[in-house]
Image: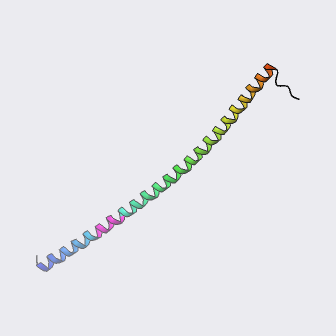
Amino acid sequence: MSNLQQSYNAGQTKGQAHEKAEQWTESAKETAHSARDKTANAAQSTKESAQHGQQQASGFIQQTGESVKNMAQGAVDGVKNTLGINEKK
């Protein structure tokens, strides 16, 4: 094989290697962008879920507080009735 043919083949191989490297780089970029998008979507979903859970917990605590308050008032009224000091004027 002549030096000219060897140089041509080497240049062709180098060009093919460069093209493959560009394809791999582009594929890696696409994979990274996809992973970033999926992570962002998962984070948003988690945030929304946490906010919903916080709202539910807040409502539950408020309802429980109202129930305890009503039971305590009922107990106070019961004691007053027993002692005869719950007369309404």
Please name the residue shown 39% across and 60% down the image.
32
Majority SS type along the magenta span: helix
Residue 55 locus on image (x, y percent): 61, 45
Q: Is residue 88 above or below residue 6?
A: above
Taking 14 as reference, is 61 left or right?
right
Taking 44 as reference, is 6 left or right?
left
Q: State the quadrant of the C terminus.
A: top right
Magenta span has 24? yes
Please name the residue shown 14% across and 75% down the image.
6
Q: Examine the image and state in which quarter residue 61 appears.
A: top right
Front residue of 45/53: it is 53
Magenta residues, start to end: 19-26
Front residue of 38/2: it is 38
Please name the residue shown 67% across and 37% down the image.
63
Residue 83 locus on image (x, y percent): 79, 19
Please name the residue shown 71% across and 29% down the image.
72
Front residue of 62/89: it is 89
Q: Is residue 76 above or below residue 11?
A: above
